[in-house]
Amino acid sequence: MTQFLKDIFKSKKKKPEVIPDLGTKPLSEDQLQTVSVSQVVIKPSQLLIGCAQSVGKQRDHNEDTLFTLSAVISDGNTELPFGLFIVADGMGGHLHGEIASGVAARAVAQYTMDKLYPSLLGLQQETQNESLQEIMEGGIREAQQTVVKRAPGGGTTLTAALVIGEQVTIAHVGDSRAYFIYPDGRMQSMTQDHSLVRRLVELGQMTEQDAASSSQRNILYRAIGQLEPFRPDINTYLFPRPGSVLLCSDGLWVVVPEADIFDVVSTTPNPSLACHKLVEMANTAGGPDNISVILVQYIS
């Protein structure tokens, strides 16, 4: 872990950009725009974040929890954006679901920060041998123990994205989702729903259309708080650049088509406003569940 952080702390000095000789011919509008954009460099690299949440139209209380935290370390030698983002969707009744999602998100955040912040700030003296994926898995285990203790009978989904430099590590349990959204039109789900209907679709025993309308689509076979042992899905990727990372509860993706989500994200330059629009779309579609959305962009 310590060597990993040392590697990503190393500065990458870029050579000055050389603009080709364009001669004395007047520049076209397209050429002027290209030259203008190429001169815009954001330093230090950083994360642009938006979030939004709603109880929905058909629920009388909120069982979702979202968490965002970001920082930048830049001192001339180090240039490191950092962020931790979590969406949790509680279940198990009025209090159990609400408590479960809240304590689970806080447990993952505290565990991860306790492990990473000393190293990130250069204050860690002893060697840290855990990988980022191992740290995230430890956070999920901590959340599991906390939910069983604090909200017995309750449970929660949890999808978390840890961004360090240009890497994003995603930990996932349940049916909240993480997406990578690219400017070229791609919207890629980076998580697999741990739901009964999704499993039946994978086995060829149910169609996508039947799964979307099934009364059992909210039944999960893996969730934080359940007594059966499980392991979270944890994977590390390069942050989509250019592009965005979207985390959301099923209150969004069940009722708003992916094409509409992409349109909002790609046409709204402000992530906070984009999240607000997505929540409004879910409510316009009936708002059958709580809605939580986090949108993260990497700018440099």
Image (spheres, helix red, strand yellow):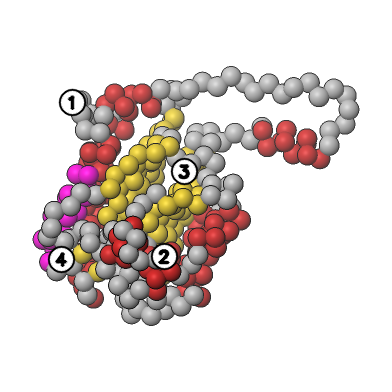
On screen, 30 above or below 93?
A: above
Earlier-in-chain disc, 3 versus 2:
3
Q: Which numbered disc, 4 or 3, marks the residue closer to the eye?
A: 4
Distance of label 1 from label 3 (alpha carbons): 29 Å
Instruction: Name the one closer to the observer, 114 or 218.
Output: 218
Residue under label 4: 151
Identity of the amino acid at label 4? Ala
* Pointer 3 with pointer 2, Cβ within 8 A: no
Residue under label 2: 208
The label shown at residue 47 is 3
Tell me: 76 left or right of 1.
right
Residue extending furthest toward the front = 204
Distance of label 1 from label 2 (alpha carbons): 50 Å
Identity of the amino acid at label 3? Leu
* Pointer 1 with pointer 4, Cβ within 8 A: no
Distance of label 3 from label 2 (alpha carbons): 35 Å
Sort mark 3 into few (<14), some (14-19) or many (20+) by Cα contacts within 10 Å: some
For the question of whether residue 74 can be seen, the reply is yes
On screen, 284 above or below 152?
A: below
Sort mark 2 into few (<14), some (14-19) or many (20+) by Cα contacts within 10 Å: some
Name the residue rendered at 42%, 26% in the picture: 78
Instruction: Name the one closer to the observer, 231 or 206.
Output: 206
Q: Position of residue 271 (x, y in %)?
A: 51, 54
Specify the segment rendered in magenta: 137-152
